[in-house]
Image (cartoon, rainbow, N blue to C red):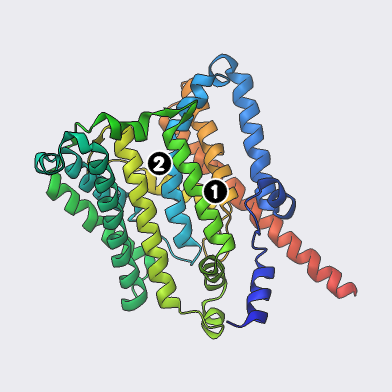
Amino acid sequence: MNKYLARNLLKDNCLPGQFNIFSLTRRDGNLRRLLLITVIIFISMSVLSPKLFLTLRNFTSMSFQFPELGILAMAMMVTMLTGGIDLSAVGIANLSGIIAALILTSDSVTGAFGNSAIATIILLAIIVSAIMGVVCGLLNGLCISKIGITPILATLGSMQIFTGIAIVITRGSAIYGFPDQFSFVGNGNIWIFPMPLIIFVILSALFAIMLNKTTFGRKLYMMGSNPVAAVFSGINNTQMLIRTYILSGFLSAMAGIVMIARTNSAKADYGTSYVLQAILVVVLGGVNPSGGFGTVSGLVLAMLCLQFLSSGFNMLHFSNFFKEFVWGAVLVAVMVLNYYSNTGRSSFRRITKGLK
């Protein structure tokens, strides 16, 4: 790899070196503004509804609600770092979840392993679900990198395929009746920490390490910044795209596992609104839709920002229509702020260069 090119690409995009939100906010103006907005929303909701918002019960409830959307947002983010998108993330999550549900409720599987080996059955269901997510991601990656279909059209089509397969398998009905040990994944606690939150934190940490500390992550940022330059620096863009969509499929499958464990059922049309919400979280978190820049810290902060808004609005009895309006308004406001901030910074640099 061309080390000079790599060093300059990383410098231009201010690639974060560590998963430290306080360090990043000092260098990243977009993240600093998002942190300020999150703090303002938290204080506003605390003042407007202190008896309901500032309670352990509310924070516990939020900790069960946002992880599945947060994991789907990670799946969306990794594809957007390449300048693409994965609209099939929810379809993959539902299909993978249904495959896991079939294994968990199958009499033949239970008979083969016996009721005493329930942990083995749960592990088998999770592994097969993950493999399904990987296969779906591989299909997306091949369509985009080998055939040359644009990501938005390829994943829009595959979303319909995955959802259609899930409907055919279940005939539109929900699958339920999982073992209690599996429901613990979505509804249990370890000490005071909900299991979905623990899973989200672990995946976020691994995702941040992968992006910032591995060769794959650095190649991903470089390819998203400038695909042509990435090729001349020795990066195989085709392989990188396939691996990226495989990773997105795996994360979507993990979201599906958390989703069916929390609701104790699996259905083909669960979480249909999550696609737009995941895009909202990723863009709000500062990920460049054209690729090349984005941090896990920004994504986590955006997730908390929207969750505070959602919980606060529920307590204030606002309608869902008003909630969606405010989410959209916040997204547009942040994008406008970022645009003018970045434009102003570029103009300032040009002026200072001219003076020199």
| Residue 54 x %, y % | 58, 20
Q: Which mark is residue 299?
A: 1
Image quarter of the N terminus: bottom right
Cβ atoms at labels 1 and 2 below 8 Å apart: no
Q: Nearer the viewer, residue 228 or 59?
A: 59
| Residue 81 x %, y % | 51, 63
Q: Nearer the viewer, residue 59 or 87?
A: 59
Q: List the single residue furthest toward the right.
A: 356
Name which residue type carries label 1: Leu
Residue at 19 percent across and 31 percent down: it is 177
- The disc, 1 or 2, on the residue closer to the chain's N-terminal end is 2
Q: Secondary structure at mark 1?
A: helix
Q: Which mark is residue 68?
A: 2
| Residue 336 x %, y % | 62, 52
Image quarter of the C terminus: bottom right
- Which quadrant holds residue 38? top right
Count how many numbered circles sit on residues in the image. Answer: 2
Instruction: Please determine whether, in this image, residue 80 is positioned above or below residue 170.
Output: below
Instruction: Please determine whether, in this image, residue 130 is positioned above or below residue 305.
Output: below
**Mark-to-mark CA distance, 1 and 2:** 13 Å
Residue at 54 percent across and 60 percent down: it is 211
